[in-house]
Image (tube, grey):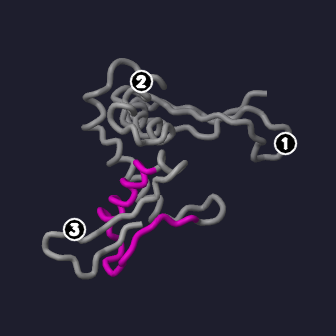
Amino acid sequence: MTLRLQAARPWELPFVSVIDARGDRRKRSYFTKWHEVAHLLLLTNDRRMSFHRTHMSGTEQDPEEALVDLVAGRCGFHRGVVVPHVRGEISFSEIERLRLRLCPESSIQAARLGFAGVWPSPSVLLECKLAVGHSGQSAEPVLRATSVRANEAAERIAMRILRFSFR
């Protein structure tokens, strides 16, 4: 949560953030810090005195929170910071090397999303899970591509990966 100080002294910053980084939440603290900074960058409502992550039910996400997450990802894994440290082809081991060097407090998942998104060469991050189809044709779970994310370099050359399943 980020709070606006109502009576900040001239030498104090106008905002203070409180981030729970205890236990399992420690690996989410890197992205959470950038999420709170993104709220301040966007300041969608000037009268707001506090900003915090909204946990909506179901799969629907508040549009403001989705925008804040997008800005946080771009800031936390900024191309200008990442690209000078890239060595060779993209791989999970190279992403882990970068994570340990640039943002060791980042979660592995956030690092994969962030670094793959700004990689200088075309790359697609593909996540597969056992899942049933949307059409309901089969109740039997099969291996499906559940998330496909192409970076800007891949989009420039019109690289496309279609969602599919293996039986």
| Residue at image coords 35%, 42% | 77
Mark 3 → mark 2, Cα distance in angstroms: 37 Å
Asked whether, in this view, residue 6 is left or right of residue 31, the answer is left
Question: Residue placed at 47% from the left, 35% from the top?
Answer: 112
Residues shaded magenta: 29-55
Residue at mark 1? 137
Q: Amino acid at mark 1?
A: Gln
Callout 3 amino acid: Leu
Q: Which one is closest to the eye, mark 1 or mark 3?
A: 3
The residue that appears at 80% across and 37% down in the rendered structure is 141
Locate the C terminus by quadrant: top right
> In what element is the residue under mark 1?
loop
* Disc 2 to disc 1: CB gap under 8 Å: no
Q: Position of residue 149 (x, y in %)?
A: 50, 38
Among all residues in the image, which is located at the extreme left?
Answer: 10
The numbered disc on residue 20 is none
Q: Which mark is residue 13?
A: 3
Q: Give yes or no for contact between labels 1 and 3 (Cβ–Cβ under 8 Å).
A: no
Image quadrant where one finds the N terminus:
bottom left
Q: Amino acid at mark 2?
A: Glu
Residue 94: assigned label: 2
Q: Residue at x 37, y 26 (%)?
A: 121
Give above or below for 144 relative to 91. below
